[in-house]
């Protein structure tokens, strides 16, 4: 009996909500004109919370003035960025760019990036280890699709990001 009663309450609630919404959408402009109730059409500016200004001020303070003792917040975020960038650069070099020594035109390639065949073989082997032949076929087909349709490099950038994030 309680299930039927709660369904009845829920139905009455939604019907009432629909009726209020319909009445407001139908008669709010007439009510606005009759009572000069501008708040019906435009949200009152005095009621708005200046959250955007608060967040901007907090971020400006954090970036420009915040000190954590021996270092600033900016130093902390740059350190975290460097800690993340080091392994990401290594994985990206292995998957896309290859390993180079030197700058600009004097750069010498030490080791090329892994070939698409090697990456697919490793990922299919990983899929076989983690699942079964169906998963391995799916992984192999998906990565072969990326290679055939010219999306290999962007997919490897994404894969490098995922490998570092996980």
Image (tube, rainbow, N blue to C red):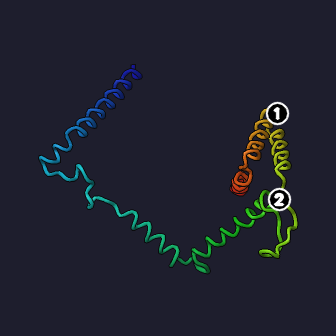
Q: Who's the residue at 19% across and 44% down the image?
A: 29
Residue 66 visible in this rendered orientation of the protein: yes
Q: Quadrant of residue 114?
A: bottom right
Residue 22 relative to residue 150: left or right: left
Picture coordinates of residue 100, whole percent (x, y)? 82, 69
In the depicted structure, whether residue 123 falls above or below residue 50: above
Instruction: Report the quarter where the N terminus lies.
Output: top left
Q: CA distance from mark 2 to mark 1?
A: 27 Å
On the rendered structure, is 125 left or right of 81? right
Packing grade of label 1 (10 A; few <14, some 14-19, many >=20) is some
Q: Quadrant of residue 46?
A: bottom left
The answer to whether residue 166 is seen in the rendering is no
Q: Which residue is mark 1?
A: 133
Q: Which residue is mark 2?
A: 113
Which residue, as the protein is rendered here, is positioned at the far right? 110
Point 30% across, 33% down: residue: 18
Q: How dense is the environment of label 2, judged by Cα within 10 Å: few (below 14), some, or many (20 and up)?
A: some
At mark 1, the secondary structure is helix
Query: Which callout, 2 or 1, points to the residue nearer the camera?
Result: 2
Q: Tell me if residue 107 comes above or below residue 33 in the rendering.
A: below
Q: Residue at x 82, y 42 (%)?
A: 124
Residue 97 x %, y %: 78, 62
Left or right of 131: which side holds 25?
A: left
Across and down, in percent, residue 25 comes to: 25, 39
Q: Quadrant of residue 146?
A: top right
| Residue sticking out furthest to the left | 34
Q: Secondary structure at mark 2?
A: loop
Residue 35's disc number: none
Q: Position of residue 142 (x, y in %)?
A: 74, 41
> Residue 97 or 47: which is nearer the viewer?
97
Q: Earlier in the sequence, mark 2 or mark 1?
A: 2
* Vertical position of residue 128 compared to residue 41: above or below: above
């Amino acid at each position: 009996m309680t299930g039927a009663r709660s369904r009845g309450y829920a139905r009455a609630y939604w019907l009432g909500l629909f009726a209020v919404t319909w009445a407001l959408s139908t008669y709010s402009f007439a009510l606005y004109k009759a009572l000069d109730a501008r708040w019906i059409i435009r949200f009152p500016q005095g009621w708005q919370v200046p959250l955007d200004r608060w967040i901007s001020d907090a971020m400006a303070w954090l970036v420009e003035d915040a000190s954590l003792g021996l270092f600033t917040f900016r130093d902390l975020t740059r350190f975290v960025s460097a800690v993340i960038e080091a392994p990401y650069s290594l994985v990206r070099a292995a998957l896309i760019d290859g390993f180079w020594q030197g700058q600009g035109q004097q750069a010498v390639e030490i080791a090329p990036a892994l070939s698409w065949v090697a990456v697919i073989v490793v990922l299919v082997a990983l899929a076989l280890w983690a699942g079964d032949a169906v998963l391995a076929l799916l992984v192999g087909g998906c990565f072969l699709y990326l290679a055939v349709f010219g999306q290999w490099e962007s997919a490897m950038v994404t894969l490098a990001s995922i490998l570092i994030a996980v």
